[in-house]
Amino acid sequence: MHTSRRTLLAATAGAAAVVAVGGGPALAEDDDTGRLDDKKVRALISRMTLEEKVGQLFVMRVYGHSATAPDQADIDANLTEIGVRTAAELIAKYRVGGIIYFGWAHNTRDPHQIADLSNGIQKASLAQPRGLPVLISTDQEHGIVARVGKPATLFPGAMALGAGGSRTDARTAGRIGGAELRAMGIRQDYAPVADVNVNPANPVIGVRSFGADPQAVAGMVAAQVKGYQSAGVAATSKHFPGHGDTETDSHYGFPVIEHTEAQWAELDAPPFRAAIAAGIDSIMTAHIMVPALDPSGDPATLSRPILTGILRERLGYDGVVVTDSLGMEGVRTKYGDDRVPVLALKAGVDQLLNPPKLDVAWNAVLQAVRGGELTEARLDESILRVLRLKAKLGLLKDPYVTRRGVDRVVGISSHLKAADRIAERTTTLLVNSGGLLPLSRRTHRNVLVVGADPASPSGTTGPPTTVLGAALTELGFTATVLSTGTAPTEATIAKAVAAAQGVDAVLVGTYNVTAASSQRTLVNQLLATGRPVVALAIRNPYDVAQLPDVKAYLAAYSWTDVELRAAVRVLAGRADPVGELPVPVQKADKPTEVLYPVGHGLSY
């Protein structure tokens, strides 16, 4: 593996340390502050070709586990979508400044492979004329959005941490999660989510948010920013100006947020202000329309009044602004794929993330500069911000990682134990009529586990019913597992009811239960057997409102193993429930009335 350290030359004590990067000119970092000498960076920018400058603004997906030798299916996908075979060819052709990793693109099989891929990408980029290191990013929010899975450490997601209420835990999760990403060569994480989830019907944010209270969310966001960035990873708060109050998923439609400017300032702005005060390295835009902030009908990603007027000028932010994925429908509704990147740059964006067709987007920016719609000076502003960030993250000194570094940091015992401890403090006991919980092995040894088995966020955990069964077995219970799905059929329900006849208790995992969901039928028929039924909301805590007859209800906020195992320790009395709702739960039949307020949480 290529692990060469960039040679550090210091002429005299206190002088600027000069770093030779690839075939490019030397860059300098100030010895005392670690900040990049802007003059040197500007000199570097001035020697870049226009094509290199355009490339530096793009962050692109690429298929494959290797930068130079991906599987044939990934080569085919790359040829179809990007017109190149490999990550190395992508870099050579477009000189992209960043690459984003996805599980579905086969970038994240295991920690050693990820480290090798990262090194291959850096080697390919530094081999180019005036080669610069690549800023590698991913969406590792933890909870229900995690691109890197086991054996890396997986933490509870945002709403779970919000239920735990500990900024220390939030910071620890960020620090450990960040350290593991950095060890694999990923130095920009698109987390934490800074959206305030005030709408229970929100289809895209939900448990990815820390909660519904703007000040509480702000505190958790600031803690996570400090955690990630103390580990040498750029945190990215998202989705500016705030995606918490929407009933449309911006992946598939164009949401409109009807908050007044005063409501925005009170509800949506505080977490972003807190992130900026905490020194956030990057902020991601939202593909949403906020008429009160910009009446033009443009999405925030393409809005100069929002990105420059509010984010840059009013909030005083001068870090990197990255778009949400340009392949999402919310940003493509009004303009074509050739106009979107140009308008985003005109609005004040620095990084253009994952356009559906890179050749269209890249050439559109190039032509906009050649035709005078964009100036080269405007590109230089963004490139300066991107290079400052690369310098801060140490990429200009040494962009490489080692397998030994992976083994020393990723998924080590102390990290896994920390995740277990934090998860235990997030489980929330919502209902416990008649003191059914904690379940005792003496009186309720035989437990039937049924429920939904949504796909693992990272592809490496679950399925949830199996994890719950195994966790009960570890604690001395006898567990029988029957997966019933998110929409159980009559036959499946009958099978579950039959299986419940001979057991002492039933544990059912619920997932986004609605008034019309057959999960309600399943639970009600299980209750009719007379067996004690314990329900565990494995995603939205709002499920509890749809199942009022359940005598014991817990919320885990996600279905990754760490949260499910913690919930079992709580229901078995091995840990006390200390989590408190970070969002209100409204009554199912009267949504204007609150069933359980923010802060609700029972204990034993």
Image: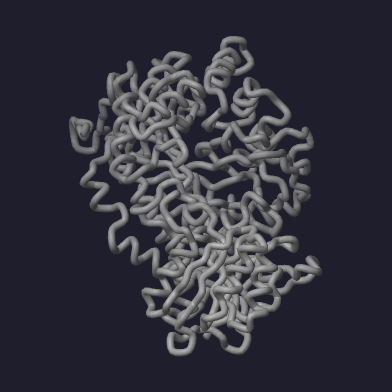
Q: Which residue is nearer to you in this view: 475 or 364?
A: 475
Name above or below for residue 228 compared with residue 40.
below
Residue at figure coordinates x 20%, y 32% from the top left: 4
In the rendered view of the protein, which quadrant contains the N terminus?
A: top left
Q: Position of residue 531 (x, y in %)?
A: 59, 82
- Give the colour scheme of this rendering: one colour
In the figure, is residue 134 to the left or right of 15? right
Name above or below for residue 432 compared with residue 106.
below
Q: Is residue 8 visible?
A: no
In the figure, is residue 151 to the left or right of 600? left
In the figure, is residue 233 to the left or right of 464? left
Name above or below for residue 347 compared with residue 366.
below
Q: Which residue is nearer to you in this view: 291 or 494?
A: 494
Quarter of the view holding residue 206? bottom right
Q: Position of residue 266 (x, y in %)?
A: 70, 56
Q: Is residue 412 visible?
A: yes
Quarter of the view holding residue 432? bottom right
**Number of callouts:** 0
Residue at figure coordinates x 60%, y 40% from the top left: 285
Q: Position of residue 159 (x, y in %)?
A: 56, 61
Residue at figure coordinates x 47%, y 31% from the top left: 61
| Residue at the outermost top position | 371
Residue at figure coordinates x 49%, y 83% from the top left: 439
Q: Position of residue 261 (x, y in %)?
A: 75, 48
